[in-house]
Structures are given as structure tokens and as C-alpha cells.
Image (tube, rainbow, N blue to C red):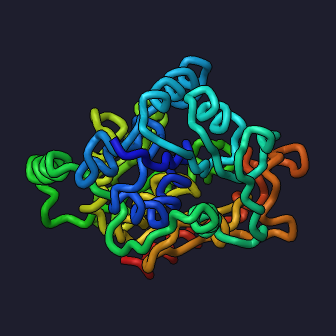
Amino acid sequence: MERKVAIVLPTWLGDFIMALPHLLGALNEDLALLVGPASFYPLLAGRFPPDTYVPFEKGGVFGLIRGAAALFRCPVDRAILLPNSFRSALMCLLGGVPRTVGFPTDGRGFLLHRRIPLPGESLHQSQVYRHIMEASGLLLPYEGPCVFPLPASRDRALTYWRQEHLLNKTVVAVHPFSSKEPRTWSPRRFRLLIERLSKEGVVPMILGKPGEREKARAMIEGIKGPFIDLTSLNVDLGDVAAFLERASLFIGNDSGPGHLAAALGIPTITIHGPTSPYITGPKGPHSRYVWSSFPCSPCRERFYKECHPGEENRPPCLEAITVEEVWGEVLKAI
């Protein structure tokens, strides 16, 4: 079998989405294998077969060993590392990859066979991934969609819409969670926003992981009118994408689902406090941002060590963003 290039993917959903436009050209030309979290593959399964994707589990020693073992069985002659982590370089070394290429970050420079110079700090993260692919000589032209859920996922979404009589309704996806609590707008304000959507005859669709189910239920408890709670459904990321395709708008924190919505072409409103939308925000023709930029923005995310939390236990830059401000953007978008 012809040897290929392994592209080691970021392990955060938002970063994965931001990297896709710059690596799908190589994947489309059958020059690369993607190496990434198993949970991400359903977003590509509608176009790229399983043998183009090498899955591993995030975190832990066993995840590292399984990833290395999977790489050991792959016909690759080098690996391009999109993450900055020492772990990704070590996984390639243990997996017998002959050469590795990436930024000399996280103390891993001695493990790399080629070190790519770091770009300027003001670049959007998606352009950082483009820089890596270009410096590696594997940036190939690509135009078109970046997310490909399976037809079965789209069928499940359509069936749900019919069962719940949603075909003629306006659905707005709301993601009130984040992987980092200090990036998360307060649950109370999200609830007020969801109540307003409901009163306007809009159907809120709550996005979240199964582990966030109780938080989601508390947020929507007592709200009249229909809503969709994806945290209570057994869905993978391909299904989430298919549900999102039917939404008219996305509202959420600076987190992965916002990037997924933007990649699907859905109008997005993301709420930013400590992070800059011009560095990590979703990229898309219909992306809007609500950002309270303080003199220290964007911060180094040493939350509550360099700033004191406000009344709702959030950084002051997040607490400065009001429900009225976000609602104003909603009215513009829909």
C-alpha cells in the first residue's frame, strides 16, 4: 500500500472544525490519513470512508497507547502535528512514524524532525492551521462543504421534525455550555434568552453533552412552548450536525458547536468574554459576535487569578454582556 501523510488533528471540536478547510484537499486527493478523536469521524463519514480516519480516544495513558498502536499499523511516512501538545509528538514516536512536523511547542522540539516557525500572534486560529499545512507542503486547493453527516443522520433529523410537527417552525439552536466554565455566559441569562425565544414562537433547541443533561433540564424547566433537548437524545456529532442543518440560527458560547454551525452555513451568534472572536471565533459569512472587550482582552485565561469574578461568578468581561445586547443581535439575525 502506498505510504501517506498522517495529519494529527486537534482534540477540541472547535479547532478540528477550523482546521478542516485546510486539510480536506489532501484527504480528497487520497494523500493523507486523518488521526483524531473517534467522536469526530461522524462529521466526515458521509463522504470519506473509515480507512481514511485513524481514531483514538482523548486523554489517559491507554488512549495514548491505543493511538500509537493504531499509527503503527498505518502506511505513513511522516506526520503533520496540528496540536501543540507534547502528547501528540510522543504518540507518533511510539507509533513508529519515521518523521514528524510541527511547532516546537510544549517542550517537544527534540521529538520533531522538522520544526515549523511559529506565526504571528494576531492570526486567527484557522490561519494557524493553514500555516502548518502550507509549511508542510500539503496545502491543496479545496472548495465546498467541510462537514458531511451520513444520510442516516439527516433521515433521523427529518423523522424527528415530522414527529414533533416542526417542519413549519423556526428552530434556534442554543448552546449554553462550554468546556471551560469561565468562558460560559451565565445559565440565568441563557434561560432568560430561551424564554424570550419561546414567547416569540421560536422553538429553542438545546445543545449539550449527555453529562450536561441535568443542567439543561434545570435551564428549561417551567418554560412554556415546544423545545428540543438534544442532551436527552442518543445522538453522535453527525446527528448533531444534521439537526443543526435544520436550524435558522445558532446562539452560544465560544465553543465547538458554534464552529460546527458556522461550517454548516447557519447564522451564528457567539458570546465572547475572555477570548477574542477575531482569534478563535467561528468563521463564516453569517457569523456575528457579542464581545465585551476590556483593556486586558483577550486574556491569558488565568481566570480569577488576574481578575475577580462578578456577581454570577463569571469574569467581568462576560458579566458585562447583557441579555438585551444578545437579543438585539438575535433580532438582526432572524
Residue 188, how many percent across, how many down? 56, 49
Vertical order, 289 against 239 (above or below): below
Confirm whether residue 156 shows in the render: yes
Residue plotted at (47% across, 57% down) = 17
- Is 147 positioned to the left or the right of 191 in the image? left
Residue plotted at (48% across, 41% down) = 36
Q: Which residue lies furthest to the top in this view?
A: 62
Residue 147, how many percent across, how many down? 34, 58
The front one of 235 and 111 is: 111
Within the image, what quadrant is residue 334 found in? bottom left
The front one of 5 and 123 is: 5
Q: Which residue lies furthest to the right in this view?
A: 306
- Is 303 positioned to the left or the right of 185 in the image? right
Quadrant position of the N terminus in the picture: top left
Residue plotted at (10% across, 48% down) = 159
- Is 170 positioned to the left or the right of 311 in the image? left
Residue 192, how many percent across, how many down? 50, 56
Confirm whether residue 191 shows in the render: no
Within the image, what quadrant is residue 235 found in? top left
- Is 117 positioned to the left or the right of 211 in the image? right
Residue 32, how many percent across, how many down? 42, 52
Residue plotted at (40% across, 32% down) = 210
The front one of 86 and 265 is: 86
- How many numbered marks does the figure carry? 0
